Image: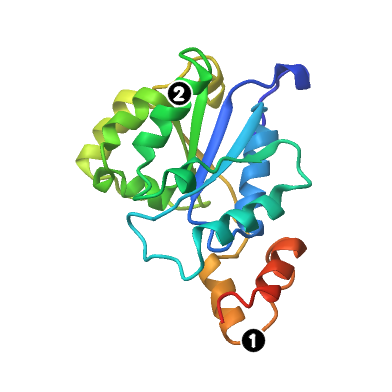
Amino acid sequence: MTIDLPNPSARKGVAIMGGTFDPIHNGHLRTAVDILDGYHYANLKLIPCFQPVHKRQPSVTPQQRLDMVNLAISSHPGLSVDAREIVREGPSYTADTLRDIRAEVGADEPLVMVLGMDSFLSLPTWHNWQDLIKYAHLFVVSRPGWEPDLISELSRFCENYRAASPHELQCTPSGLVWFETLTPLGISSSMIRTLARQGKSIAYLLPEPVQNYIEKNQLYR
């Protein structure tokens, strides 16, 4: 899956991963590191949402979820946290976030939004979803062996914007879709919430500082 770029100075482009991160766990982080290092992006930003539009409202506060993301990435210099959706408050519309980031990074910087296949399949239900491609590339992560049927609207979208290689996403600012197969860790936020609620150990499913934060603050009980 890696691209043969000559050296670390060739790192280019900003990747972003949004999510509820309720809580952030090693599955999120492994995907982030695989993409950051495998494709030589200069930086990958994790963007916790304030109010998810398509999911239930989290039981912990936005600030607590933000705290956990900060704790999770503190030892990895290539990952950073972008708190704009929590600062902005209200429903977290991705189109608004990408428009703001595009204005900050400028017209020429490659901007890549990472999302899972489940999220990609739900795109037609997103607010102003067809604007996303104006601001960023879409890097869609799928599980091995999963070949979903695309509805006609998404099928046309892929035909219009599909990249020939992942390297293209670093050569232009926006406007392309790339599908990549990665083997995910068998971890989910709902699994961690359930274990915590049952008083069972959540060790090794998420970074130790995040585990300590959850236990200290008695989250998900």
**Would residue 198 appear left or right of 132 to someone viewing this image?**
right
Q: Amino acid at mark 1?
A: Gly
Where does the image place residue 39, in percent across and percent down from the top left?
Answer: 64, 30
Q: Amino acid at mark 2?
A: Arg
Numbered marks: total: 2
Residue sitting farthest toward the left: 152
Compare marks 2 and 1 and give the one earlier in the sequence.
2
- List the residue tagged with mark 1: 199
Q: Which mark is residue 102?
A: 2
Where does the image place residue 135, in percent across and percent down from the top left?
Answer: 39, 25
Residue sitting farthest toward the bottom: 198
Marks 2/1: CA–CA distance: 43 Å
Q: Quadrant of the C terminus?
A: bottom right
**Would residue 131 appear left or right of 178 to someone viewing this image?**
left
**Would residue 214 appear left or right of 101 to someone viewing this image?**
right
Q: Can you say whether 217 is above or below 172 in the image? A: below
Query: Looking at the rendering, which quadrant does residue 151 occupy?
Result: top left
